[in-house]
Amino acid sequence: MSIEIPAGLTDLLKGYTVEVLRSRPPDLVEFAIQYFSRLRESNTFRPISRSPDPTLTERKAVSFEEDAQPSGLSADEEDDAFSEELHFKPPPPKFTRRVSVCAEAYNPDDDVDDENEPRIVHSKTDEQRHRLQEACKDILLFKTLELEQFSEVLDAMFEVLVKPEEHIIDQGKDGDNFYVIERGVYDILVQKDGVSICVGKYDNKGSFGELALMYNTPRAATIIAKQQGALWALDRATFHRLIVKANAKKRKMYEVFVESVPLLKSLELSERMKIVDVPFLMLLC
Ligand SMILES: Nc1ncnc2c1ncn2[C@@H]1O[C@@H]2COP(=O)(O)O[C@H]2[C@H]1O
């Protein structure tokens, strides 16, 4: 019996995988429900299926949701939704966001040059630096950094000791720091219809607090320490200068490269962006 992979399945799962790697949700099933619901609602695969090219059978097959559920968006809005999907993007809008927030893909060219801003350095003992390095070695967001940038990040981080039941982050507040866990257990709570629900926990490793800093949005969850613990914090400005900017610049580099390949010129923008995401993702892995 030969097994045939349904057309479009690979693309569909690749998109989901990309979002998982970016958002690192604690609950993959819940995240999948949100991701695929959002996909159906926003019809983000529409630009692909719109192609009249009959040779693009695989891409057409991905559009089955579109036919069943018109999105109500204009073609331009849908293009935007699709290309944003492939840039850094916060999780689906299940949280109440302030009206004034900015959750667009970050473009490093639009930003003022902050290279001359004073560097923040929090002095550490050798022992502290060693613990910090251990805590940071598997942090995904740091993986794309050059050695020099990584060292700057470590310099800027400072230790935060926490007590049981201490609120590290409160949903809806502005973001101040990004946190890396050295030790301790932390509950993740999200408000839904006025009720706070524990959607997961961090257990002695990982990081949190990047979303508000990356997308300039209010905090998307509340984080509460369940026992005494230790965190390493990175201030907003340094996080932006070294992490957000560096990642965006790297991605931009791939974009420029992909744009310059004649063979790829006939592809739609959304398709070229997909190609950009492959090496970018590999860097993160
Ligand atoms: N399901 C979740 N929804 C929102 N935020 C989450 C979730 N799980 C973990 N978090 C983290 O909780 C953090 C709360 O502050 P931020 O929104 O800055 O960034 C958020 C994520 O790092």
Image (spheres, helix red, strand yellow):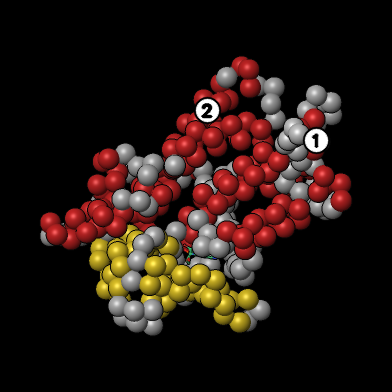
Nearer to us in this view, 94 or 8: 8
Q: Which residue is mark 1?
A: 60
Is disc 2 placed on a helix, strand or loop? helix
Query: Residue 83 falls in which quadrant of the image?
Result: top right
Most extreme residue toward the left is 126
Is disc 1 placed on a helix, strand or loop? helix
Give the amino acid at mark 1: Lys
> In which quadrant will I find the C terminus?
top left
Give the amino acid at mark 2: Val
Contact between marks 1 and 2 (CB within 8 A): the answer is no
Which label's residue is closer to the chain start, 1 or 2? 1
Q: Which residue is mark 2?
A: 256
- Dot 2 surroundings within 10 Å: few (below 14), some, or many (20 or more)? few
| 169 relative to 7 in the view: left or right | left
Is residue 194 in sight in this rendering? yes
Q: Position of residue 123 (x, y in %)?
A: 16, 59
Question: Residue at (75%, 38%) from the top-left corner?
Answer: 6
Nearer to us in this view, 31 or 238: 31
Is residue 173 in sight in this rendering? no
Query: Residue 176 falls in which quadrant of the image?
Result: bottom left
Question: Residue at (39%, 60%) from the top-left corner?
Answer: 206
- Dot 1 surroundings within 10 Å: few (below 14), some, or many (20 or more)? many
Inter-mark Cα distance, 1 to 2: 27 Å
